[in-house]
Amino acid sequence: MNGLDHAYALLDLARDDLKACRQMVQDRENFTDAIFGFHIQQAIEKSLKAWLAALGIEYPKTHSLHRLLILLEEAQAPMESCHWVEEFSPFAVQFRYEFDPWDEPLERSHTVRMTESLLDHVATQIQLFSIHK
């Protein structure tokens, strides 16, 4: 699979995680913030890895959104304030095993909208890259 095909496959997986999050927005009884945050983190991680794959950059096997952002910065990718995503890194593993990771409940609707915007931005960047390649 070439870089662009891999990128589009990862983006599809990210959209699947985001679709699950949309269902969890109102259903706090059945889906804790840890579960919701995990799927948001996964959507973000997969979208950043998709972007890196499209750029032909080999990404590490990591859940650290910070590390992925550094790779994108080094590639001079247009990241227009993507750093908000870093706060979701702990949901990959750490918060899945803690009982109360946050003092305040997650703002699920806002988080879904922000993640949708990120995925749209990444999809646009991948498409632009594929056109100019």
Image: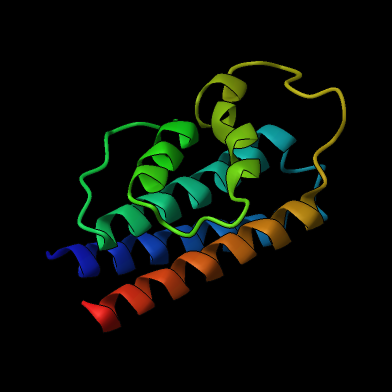
Q: Quadrant of the C terminus?
A: bottom left
Among all residues in the image, which is located at the extreme bottom? 131
Viewer-proximal residue, 42 or 123? 123
Q: Residue at x 35, y 50 (%)?
A: 49
In percent of width and height, residue 40 lies at 59, 47
Q: Indicate left or right for 49 with 89 as reference.
A: left
Q: Indicate left or right for 13 with 103 as reference.
A: left
Examine the rendered structure and indicate whether residue 19 appears above or below residue 124. above
Q: Indicate left or right for 80 with 46 as reference.
A: right
Q: Residue at x 79, y 55 (%)?
A: 110
Label total for image: 0
Among all residues in the image, which is located at the extreme top? 98
In percent of width and height, residue 117 lies at 63, 65
Q: Residue at x 80, y 40 (%)?
A: 106
Q: Please tell me in which quadrant of the rendered image residue 85 appears.
A: top right
Examine the rendered structure and indicate whether residue 59 appears above or below residue 26. above
In percent of width and height, residue 127 lies at 36, 78
Q: Residue at x 27, y 63 (%)?
A: 54
Q: Quadrant of the N terminus?
A: bottom left
